[in-house]
Image (cartoon, rainbow, N blue to C red):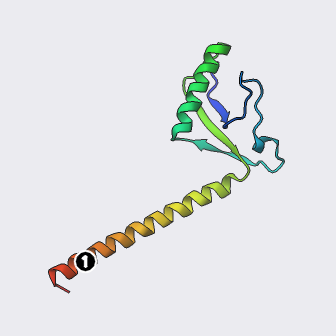
Amino acid sequence: MGYDFWAVGTDCCAPRGEGFECASISSNSTMGGKRVLVGPARDNYRLAVEEAAATYNIQSDHAIFFEIVDDAVGDIDDLKSDGYKIYAYGVGIYAGVQALCVLATGAF
């Protein structure tokens, strides 16, 4: 049997890995999780899973990591809002460069 779903966090375990106690987990308002896809934390989570697999003789071939958060929907909305801002900046920069090119050629 494999263990592929992992609840993860930073500084949530004792030094030897006993227990799992993150601030979000003890809150009654915790309503979901957010999947960790990229980033340096994911690499560290993968190392922790490999250590757990060796220590407890378990198998985890395709680990999927979830951070427990108080407001998963709010976090996703924030990411979406950031994406819209980046898109708008990109469109603005593109339009500005195009306008400068038109002005530079004198064909307006």
Q: Amino acid at mark 1?
A: Leu
Query: Horizontally, is 18 left or right of 58 in the view?
Result: right
Q: Residue at x 49, y 66 (%)?
A: 85
- In the image, is residue 64 above or below residue 99? above
* Residue drawn where x is 66% and y is 41% of the image: 67
The quarter of the picture where the N terminus appears is top right
Residue 89 image point, x, y percent = 42, 68
Q: Residue at x 38, y 70 (%)?
A: 91
Please name whichever residue, 23 or 25, is drawn nearer the observer in this view of the structure.
23
Give the class, few, some or many, for how many residues have Cα within 10 Å of label 1's Cα (few <14, many ≥20): few
Q: According to the image, label 1 marks what residue?
A: 100
Position of the C terminus, as image quadrant, is bottom left
The residue that appears at 51% across and 41% down in the rendered structure is 39
- Most extreme residue toward the right is 28
Q: Position of residue 60 (x, y in %)?
A: 59, 22
Residue 42 visible: yes
Q: Is residue 63 at all visible to an observer of this figure?
A: no
| Quadrant of res 63 | top right
Q: Residue furthest bottom?
A: 108
Q: Determine the secondary structure under disc 1.
A: helix
In the displayed structure, 49 sits above or below 103; it is above
The x and y percentages for residue 2 are: 62, 21
The quadrant in which residue 66 appears is top right
Q: Position of residue 31 (x, y in %)?
A: 75, 49
49 vs 99: above or below: above
Total numbered circles: 1
